[in-house]
Amino acid sequence: AIEAERGGPEPVLIDAGDALFPSALSSALLAETTSAAAVVETLARAGYDALALGDATLVGRLESLEGLLDAADGVDLPVLASNLSCPDDAADSCGQGIDGRTADSALISRGAIEIGLLNLLPGALDDALPASRLAGGELTDPAETTGAQIEQLRSAGADLVVLISNLDTEDSAPRETLELLSALEGDARPDLVVSASTGHVVSMMRSPGDGPPVVTARPGELGRVELRQHEGRW
């Protein structure tokens, strides 16, 4: 939830990753009669603004992943995968695959505030996925593109940039996320980081160099973050 001030705009609701797996609820539903489309439609009815593509969903059952992407497109719910890209020589095939149905970023309006959203997946996943899964697309190294994407969101009018990180596993958390943040400076830094896969490590901390706060998206739980501006910073 992001608010400019108490009593301000409605909150922004984000699924930080793996809405389908390994969520106990959705896994149970999908094992019975409920489709991935029904899970996404439920999120849309609940008022979600964006859904981050998580690594477990990306490598999970292909029919569930495709069902999620099709349903999200039908309800106008952006599915974020910011470092999933189409090389020029694979643009035709890639555009019909996962990358053609995901978004690099989203810009959400709340009152007078524009909130930019990004979601990062580990580039190492590229080697673990069958080529057909990405249909010619590839997961790039987040360090190569993230700063430029954040600056583009600010140029597009984002007052607040939220970076969702699916970079870490429980074993690596929060190392990969903090290493990325340490390489970002100035306007290329996000204002808030929502870190998935770190539920047993930390609930909130500061990133390197007095950087943005990092908060945990605990698996299976609904968390709330309330932000206010103070002396030009969130």
Image (cartoon, rainbow, N blue to C red):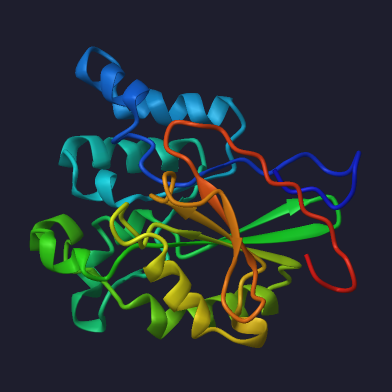
Side of 48 relative to 155 (left or right):
left
Q: Is residue 179 above or below residue 162?
A: below
Instruction: Name the one closer to the observer, 30 or 55.
Output: 55
Residue 80 % position (x, y)? 44, 55
**Among the 4 quarters of the image, the one containing residue 185:** bottom right
Q: Residue at x 27, y 71 (%)?
A: 123
Q: Nearer the viewer, residue 122 or 31?
A: 122
The location of residue 68, given as percent across then percent down, is 33, 38
Res. 193 image quadrant: bottom right
Q: At 90% across and 42% down in the image, what residue appears?
A: 6
Quarter-of-image position of residue 112: bottom right
Up/down of 17 relative to 68, above or below? below
Give the tally of numbered discs: 0
Relative horizontal placement of residue 51, taking residue 6 as reference (left or right): left
In the image, taking residue 38 as reference, residue 57 lies left or right, namely left
| Res. 93 visible in picture | no
Residue 170 placement, left or right of 75: left
Residue 11: x and y, percent?
73, 41
Quarter of the figure that contains the C terminus? bottom right
From the viewer's perspective, is residue 60 above or below residue 115? above
Tell me if residue 59 can be seen. yes
Q: Is residue 72 above or below residue 185?
A: above
Question: Residue at point 18% right, 67% down?
Answer: 126
**Residue at the limit of the structure toward the top, as seen here:** 33
Residue occupying image coordinates x 25% and y 50%? 58
Locate residue 228, reporting x and y percent: 83, 56
Quadrant containing the N terminus is top right
